[in-house]
Image (cartoon, grey):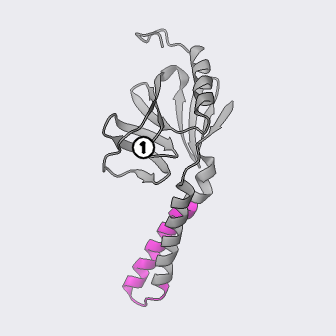
């Protein structure tokens, strides 16, 4: 197995700011004796947990290439793409739609809708710029490896040994 880290971004800063804002709401809630204080306290705690969780998991964003699969990882979450299902890989700059998804400056995770290509399952340290778009069996995945050239070469090398003879183009 070969592992590739995601390229650096401002994602850590986004999570730190999110945690700080949440802690601010907690402090505000502690100073309010009414129901509004409870709401601020609960909201602040939830936002803080999201920020702190993101900081904790940030360095786990990576892509593992095995003999049979490409495994995308972020914390405890994973997506497994069989190499035989991969049809194409291309580098794109994308335009996200306004639909809700998990994207902060420096992180895109989960299903994100893009103007040009529709739904993409993102495991990336960027929401729009320099995305490697992987088309696999009718699904699209977006990744941002630190060493893009080495990632693509390794993936192409492994894929060449997993040609799908039933595909119309032999890939």
Let me know if residue 84 is in the magenta part. Answer: no
- Expressed as whole percent of the image width and height from the top left, the position of residue 17 reads 51, 66
Q: State which region is magenta.
A: 30-53
Q: What residue lies at 43% left-to-right and 91% top-to-bottom?
A: 33
Residue positioned most to the bottom: 33
Name above or below for residue 51 compared with residue 2: below
Bin the neighbour count of mark 1 within 10 Å (Cα to Cα): few under 14, some 14-19, many 20 and up.
some
Q: Secondary structure at mark 1?
A: loop
Let me know if residue 47 is in the magenta part. Answer: yes
Q: Which residue is mark 1?
A: 128
Name above or below for residue 35 compared with residue 83: below
Q: What residue lies at 44% left-to-right and 39% top-to-bottom?
A: 121
- Expressed as whole percent of the image width and height from the top left, the position of residue 170 reads 47, 9
Residue positioned most to the right: 1
Q: What residue lies at 55% left-to-right and 60% top-to-bottom?
A: 13
- Expressed as whole percent of the image width and height from the top left, the position of residue 59 reads 63, 50
> Which residue occupies the foreground of this view, 116 or 83?
116
Q: What residue lies at 40% left-to-right and 43% top-to-bottom?
A: 111
Quarter-wise, where is residue 140 in the image? top left
Quarter-wise, where is residue 120 in the image? top left
- Expressed as whole percent of the image width and height from the top left, the position of residue 167 reads 43, 12
> Which residue occupies the foreground of this view, 138 or 104?
104
* Residue 97 in the figure: left or right of residue 12: left
Quarter in which the N terminus is drawn: top right
């Amino acid at each position: 197995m070969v592992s590739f880290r995601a390229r650096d971004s401002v994602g850590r800063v986004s999570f730190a700011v999110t945690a700080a804002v949440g802690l601010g709401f907690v402090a505000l809630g502690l100073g309010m004796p009414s129901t509004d204080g409870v709401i601020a306290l609960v909201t602040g705690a939830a936002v803080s947990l999201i920020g702190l969780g993101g900081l904790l998991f940030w360095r786990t964003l990576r892509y593992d290439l095995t003999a049979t699969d490409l495994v995308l990882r972020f914390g405890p979450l994973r997506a497994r793409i069989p190499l035989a299902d991969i049809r194409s890989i291309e580098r794109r700059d994308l335009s996200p739609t306004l639909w809700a998804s998990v994207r902060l400056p420096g992180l895109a995770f989960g299903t994100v809708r893009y103007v040009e290509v529709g739904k993409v399952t993102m495991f990336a340290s960027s929401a729009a710029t320099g995305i490697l778009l992987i088309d696999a069996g009718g699904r699209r995945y977006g990744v941002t490896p630190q060493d893009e050239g080495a990632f693509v070469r390794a993936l192409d090398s492994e894929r060449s040994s997993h040609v799908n003879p039933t595909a119309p183009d032999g890939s």
